[in-house]
Image (cartoon, rainbow, N blue to C red):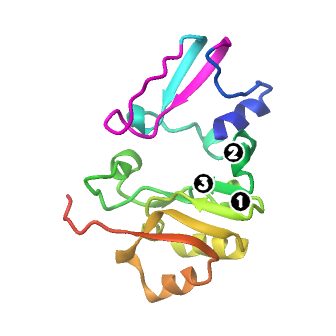
Amino acid sequence: MKLSEYHTRHGDRVEWWDPAKQYDLVYKSRVFTDTYSKDTIQVSNADKVIQGGTGYGPGENLPHEIEHIRPDYFLYPRFLGTAYGFLSRGCPRNCGFCIVSKKEGRRSVRVADLSEFWNGEEEIKLMDPNLLACPDHERLIEQLIESRALVDFTQGLDIRLISRDNVSLLNKVRTKAVHFAWDNRTRT
C-alpha cells in the first residue's frame, strides 16, 4: 500500500498484476517461505520485477520516503475503514519460531506515530511485534487511546511485560482484539 501511494504520487498508474498485460515494473511480495506456501506465480510480462518480503529473505527495508508515507488504502477497497501499520519494530525475545528478531533487530524501537497511517478510520490493526518492549510504548498507547478507534493488537502483547502502569493504559484503549504472546523457552 505504501509503494502504491508512492508511485501514484509520482504519476504512475498502479493496478493489480494481470498476466495478460505488459508492465514496466511489477512488485512481487511474500510473507512466508516455501515451508508454508509455494511461490507458483511466475511474472514474465514486466520489464522489471522486484521481489520483497520475508518470504524472499531478509532483503532491504523500504526507503525512508516510502516507509513513512500514508498507505494507499484504496488498493484494498474491502478494508476501507481500517488503518494498518506499525508504531514499533523489533523484538528482544528471539523466539525460535519467529523471524522478527533476525529481520528487525532484538530491540523494540518506535518507528512511527499513529498519524502516519491512521486518519480517522474506525479500526486500527496494529502489526507491532512487541509494542510493550518499546521504551516509548506508553506514549504510543496514549496515541491509540486518543484515537478512540477500535484497536486490534494483531501480533500479540508480551504478557511478561504487563505492569500496573501499562495495563492501566491498555484498559483505556477501545480494544477490538488482544492477543497475548509468550514463549517460555530460553533463547540466546
Q: Camera-side residue: 188 or 42?
A: 42
Check disc 1 and give the amino acid type. Ser
Mark 2 or mark 3, earlier in chain: 2
Q: Residue at x 59, y 69 (%)?
A: 140
Question: Is residue 41 found inside the magenta-colored segment of the image?
Answer: yes
Residue that carries the numbered disc 1 in the rendered image: 115
Can you say whether 61 is above or below 183 in the image? above
Check disc 3 and give the amino acid type. Gly
Point out residue 122 in the picture as x, y percentages from the top left corner: 74, 64
Residue that carries the numbered disc 3 in the rendered image: 85
User: Badge 3: few (under 14), some or many (20 or more) residues near its Cα, within 10 Å?
Assistant: some
Q: Are marks 2 and 3 in contact (CB under 8 Å)?
A: no
Q: Residue at x 64, y 24 (%)?
A: 17
Q: Is residue 162 left or right of residue 128?
A: left
Q: Which residues are magenta?
A: 20-43
Q: Camera-side residue: 186 or 73?
A: 73
Q: Quadrant of residue 92?
A: bottom left
Point out residue 2 in the picture as x, y percentages from the top left corner: 65, 40
Q: Quadrant of residue 20?
A: top right
Can you say whether 163 is above or below 65 in the image? below
- Image quarter in which the C terminus is found: bottom left
Q: Residue at x 38, y 59 (%)?
A: 91
Mark-to-mark CA distance, 3 and 1 = 10 Å
SS at mark 2 in the image: loop
Q: Is residue 46 left or right of residue 8?
A: left
